[in-house]
Image (tube, rainbow, N blue to C red):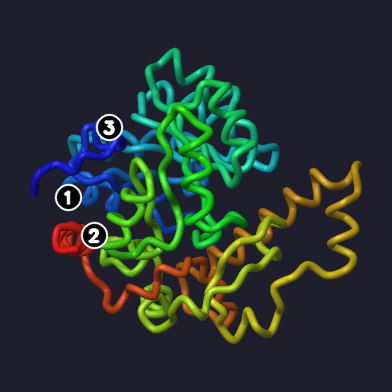
Amino acid sequence: MEQVKAKLCEMLGIEFPVIMAPMFLVSDEKMIIEGIKSGITGAIPALNYRDTEDLRKAIRKIKSEAIGPFGINLIVNKSNFLYKEQLQVCCEEKVDFFITSLGSPEETIRKSKKYGIKVFCDVTDVSYAKKVEELGADAVIAVCKEAGGHAGSISYKELIPQLKKELRIPVLSAGGIGTGKGIKEMLLLGSDGVSMGSIFIATKEAPVSEEYKKACVQYGAKDIVLTTKLSGTPCTVINTPYVQKVGTSQNWFEKILNKNKKLKKWFKALTFLRGMKSLRNAAFSSTYKTVWCAGPSIEHVHEIRTVQEVVEELKKDFQNS
């Protein structure tokens, strides 16, 4: 297909303005390699790797098997004890871009500029977006209310126009996009590209269990709920019987610890680690404790396919809409 005229394509030299969103435990090298070969780009959470040397090996593997840009997602707050090491390794290996989440991107931006690496910052409102623009971010990713994972609180219909009005840097949209028609609607709204994650969970390349993939086929947008039990920050999951059983809110004692000035940092880190262990167990094995992270765009997932098949359908739908 002809190259789509979107700022993201221009910035990264890609054919189609899509970032395969970084998904904790889901995104891996195989998925990114196939995405690059299909004309899009993608990013992997640094926390998907046990240590920084595994992260380095993954970056080198992608570079050896595909020619095209890709990025790494960094959690830049104090809950990520490996942050500085991850940043250093990614800079040394010269990834094409970072996506920063859940904290100040100041150090990441400052260091990245020395290596010519772009920085895209997750934002949920205009005030924070303006701050990261002042710090030197290359683009913002508008995490809308419709997003999967750590979703925002404002619908894309409001947030994208607000950000386009106030910012000079490109605005990418994340949230609720599952079709080529949806991508076109975002571009017409003013977005300079999109970030899409949940529709890629049910792919043959994804390393997660067949149960997780089948859940993305069987469940829909109405089955997505917000929980604070995984990281302390609202996160979207599929409303399985187990999620219904344990609830989606922290109990009174957890809420008190979360507000205590002295204990808050450590409690958040503990909550995060405990929640990530729960997600890991559910993602890779058959267990009744099914806590599967996903967003409303699983509404558009009807079968398990390859990454290339998903991208080709997006392109076709985009052209025909």
Q: Amino acid at mark 2?
A: Val
Reading the image, the residue beneath label 3 is: 12
User: Which of label 2 and label 3 is nearer to you?
Assistant: 3
Query: In what element is the residue under mark 2?
Result: helix
Is residue 150 among what the camera can see?
A: no
The image quadrant of residue 84 is top right
Horizontal arrangement in the rendering, residue 247 relative to residue 289 (left or right): right
**The C terminus: image quadrant:** bottom left
Is residue 289 among what the camera can see?
A: yes
Reading the image, the residue beneath label 2 is: 307
Reading the image, the residue beneath label 1 is: 38
Residue at image position (46%, 69%) is: 296
Residue lying furthest left: 1
Task: Tell me the number on the disc at residue 74.
Answer: none
Q: Amino acid at mark 1?
A: Ser
Q: Report the number of numbered marks.
A: 3
> Disc 1 to disc 3, how far (Cα)?
14 Å
Horizontal arrangement in the rendering, residue 9 relative to residue 215 (left or right): left
The image quadrant of residue 70 is top left
Residue at image position (54%, 68%) is: 281
